[in-house]
Structure formats: structure tokens, C-alpha cells
Amino acid sequence: MTVDAIVVGAGQNGLTAAARLARAGREVVVIERAPTVGGSTRTLELMVPGIVHDAGATVVPFAAASPAFRTLDLDLPFVYSELSLAHPFDDGTAAAVERSLDSTAAGLGDDASRYRRVMQPLVRNFDALADATLAPAIRQARHPLVAARFGPLALLPGTVLGRMFRTEAARALITGVASHATVPADHVLTAGVGITLLAAAHGVGWPMLAGGTQVLADRLAAVVEQHGGKIELDHEVMSLDELPAARAVLLDVTPRQFVRLAPDAARAYSRWAYGPGVCKVDYVLSGALPWTADACRRSATVHLGGTAAEILDSEREIARGRIPERPYVIVVQPQLADPTRARDGNVPLWAYCHVPNGANVDASPMIEAQLDRFAPGWRDLVVARQVLTAAASEAVNPNLVGGDIAGGLTTARQMLFGPRPGRSPYATNLPGVYLCSSSTPPGAGAHGMCGWYAAGAVLRSLTRQRE
């Protein structure tokens, strides 16, 4: 029997693709190597019973902005901390991003008017901005107003955008959010990453999901099954040749896995470039971190890096294949948005920094030195800790090639066009085979849009087959 579509991989993109196809009345089978759905959107007990940790994404602004999740009526249980982001400095102060654009601007002092001038038009048109940025390049042209305002800034390096501001607080804030691009902030397009994150903070906030990000995967899986789709777990696909007959195959894998699944036909995909890896440390603490800056006690997300120059230098070191003494560290305190994460006085915490791709190096001493710098005395609270190196993360989830959580290096070509430039960035050089992972546009983030648009390409193909 030939099914309409087989989806390999039950990450949030694979599940979104399957949900769209199933809702359209197509017969869908999802195959997943792990015993649970979710990929990098899984939530697990790691060390202490009752304390759960997110395997990957915790703060999910693009889930709140996702057109796909709205259309699928997921009704996700978003929860928020008082502040979206805090960026502390050595003098005990911190730059803070609030849901209110005006309050955030006011906190930047002499740069208040500049911040409003950059962000206000984008926040005012945030729905259009989200629709444009969470889409392949060919669709972005449907929003000329957003393109006119966002495009010129988005193409800039984050450092150029930062130099538009006078205060160190604003420059460091911009450099920190731009460095989510996983390349140094002096690279093109990093300003676009930073501006999009800041616009999301004001447009939809930086929420989490009550109970953990697994909720997203579980609700997507429920949509698939409610519309007749099937999900097979504990089934690792080693070759496309072993799949049952299907009119279309969607792969929630990166190009390197595609090459392994179809080595002869997919050789062209071996040129795909991967970005730096991540060394992540999960903690259980006996209380909240003793931050020097008050804003850090009110924000679930904290960027540790000090000045803009320090952050840029640390990310440049990683691009050169070295691990800096003072890395740029992203910290998440889930209980500040979701009090249910706390148990018997214990709370979860995670922190990560970038490292060279594939590095089998425990960077926790450098991460913890940054915590010492901004939250002295925090070590007294540690109940348990677990380190996941970049090399080890790929063993847990093969899509994290060398520990790259973004699915590929942030370059203009890869971000805009994906692994195979053409009319469809999802169709491969194999008939009926599509990629739907974060290696395809619009790229990384818990938004499901890679799977959504890949499923759209499949639906159009299936319709033509029946005509």
C-alpha cells in the first residue's frame, strides 16, 4: 500500500509538516528513532526527580509568533517572566528588555530615542515582520513595507548596528542578541537576527511553555494522530531504500544525514557548512541565583558577556577554533516564568556557550567563571549538574551535527536559500524527497515553519499528481 507521505524525524518541524498534511486529509506516517517525539523540543528529568529540563529550546518567542502554530490551533500554554532579557555589567547594573518598547527604551538612557526609532516601526508591524522573516526568501517579497524598513538593517553586521548607539548598555545588548546568529556579530545578517529577537520581545514577548517545551511536540503529535496520521517511535531509518512506498518523503534531518540516507544521489549536499557547537550545562539549584544586578532576578533569560567588545572577541575566538577564557554565555532560569518547574525549594537552570564545531571539551569552568562574575556565591546552591559537550550532543540527537543547534552556519546563502537554491528550497534532487529541517528556510527556531512550507510544497505536488 502506498501512503501519501512519510516523515522521517519527529522534531517540531517534522511534526508540523505531518500535522499540515494530515489536516489536509493526506495519509501520513511519521518515523522517529527516539522513544519520544520532540527532538530538541523534548523535556526530561535529568538529575533530580520532579525537576524537568528542556533538551534544547526553552524560551520560544517564535512559537508565539508562528503562523503555523496559530493555523493548527495548538493553544499553547505560554508563560512569561517579568522581563524578557537582562544583560548585566560588572558595576552591578544591567540592560533590560521589557515587553513594553517605551519602558525598554527609557532604560537605555541617552539611547532611548535611537532605540525607539529603530524598533518602533517593526514592532508596530510585527505580524507582517513575523510572516516575512518566518518564510523562505521567495515569499518575503510579499511584504514590501517590512522589506523597506527591515531589509537595510537586517543585512548589516550587528557591530554596525551597535555603533548607531552611544551607550555601552545599548551596544552590548545589541551585540548579545545579534550573537544568537552563532557567528561573530561583525558578520552580515547578524543585525537582522538581533532586531528580529528584540522585535519579538516587544511584539509577542519571550515566553516559555508551562511544563516544558515538550508540550509543543506533544500537541503537534496529537494533531497528527487526531487526523489519522501514525507515529512510529524507536525506529531508526538507515537508508531511504528501506522506507515503505510513499508518494512523498519529508526528512526532518540536516544535509549530512541526508547524504547518509542517500549517499549517491545526495552527494551535492555534502558541501553544507555547519556552525559552532554548544557546550550546555544543566543544573539543579537549591534556590534562585544571587545576581548582583536586580534585573537578572526578574528575567528568565540572561546574557553573560560584559561589554560589546568582550562578546565580539569571544565569538571571534570560537570562529578561529579556540575556546575563549570569557565566553558569551546564555543562561535560562525557567522557574521565573513557570513556577511549576520548582520542586521542594529546588529549581532548574541551564547555561551554554558556543564552542568550535565538534569540540569534545567541557567548557563548564569558563561558563561557571562567568556566573561567578555576575552572581557571586551561586556555587553554594548547586545540588546537581550535568554537562553535555558539543560532541556528545550529536550522539543524543544526530541533527545536532558537531553540536550545531541551528542546523547550519549563518551565511547569507544558507539562510536565504537553504541547501539547494531553486524554486523550492525544500525539494531535493531526488524526485518526491523533501527536506523540512531547520537547515531549510526560515532556519532555526521553535516555529515549525520549515516543516509547514515543506508540507505546502508536498501538497502542491500531490495535487498535480492527481490531476
Image (spheres, rainbow, N blue to C red):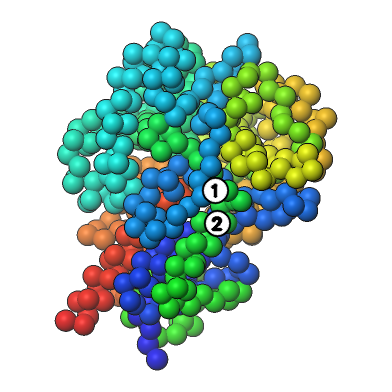
Residue 51 appears in the rendering: yes
Image quarter hosting the C terminus: bottom left
Q: Which amino acid does label 1 sit on?
A: Leu
Residue 270 appears in the rendering: no
Image quarter hosting the N terminus: bottom left
Q: Residue at x 60, y 66 (%)?
A: 36
Judged from this view, the residue extending furthest toward the top is 110
Which residue in the structure is indicated by mark 1? Answer: 209
Image position, residue 397 (x, y; %)? 59, 59
Is 320 on the left or on the right of 101, as rendered? Answer: right
Above-or-below relation of 269 to 165: below
Which residue in the structure is indicated by mark 2? Answer: 215
**In the structure shown, which secondary structural element does the residue marked by tag 1 occupy?**
strand
Neighbourhood count class around disc 1 (C-alpha, 10 Å): few under 14, some 14–19, many 20 upward: many
**In the structure shown, which secondary structural element does the residue marked by tag 2 occupy?**
helix
Image position, residue 350 (x, y; %)? 66, 40
Q: Residue at x 49, y 68 (%)?
A: 222
Q: Which residue is drawn at 30% across and 50% down?
A: 135
Q: What residue type is labelled 2?
A: Val
Image position, residue 428 (x, y; %)? 33, 67
Q: Which residue is drawn at 61% across and 51% down?
A: 211
Is 199 on the left or on the right of 423, as rendered? Answer: right
Image position, residue 163 (x, y; %)? 38, 16
Q: Do the residues labelled 1 and 2 touch (CB within 8 Å)?
A: yes
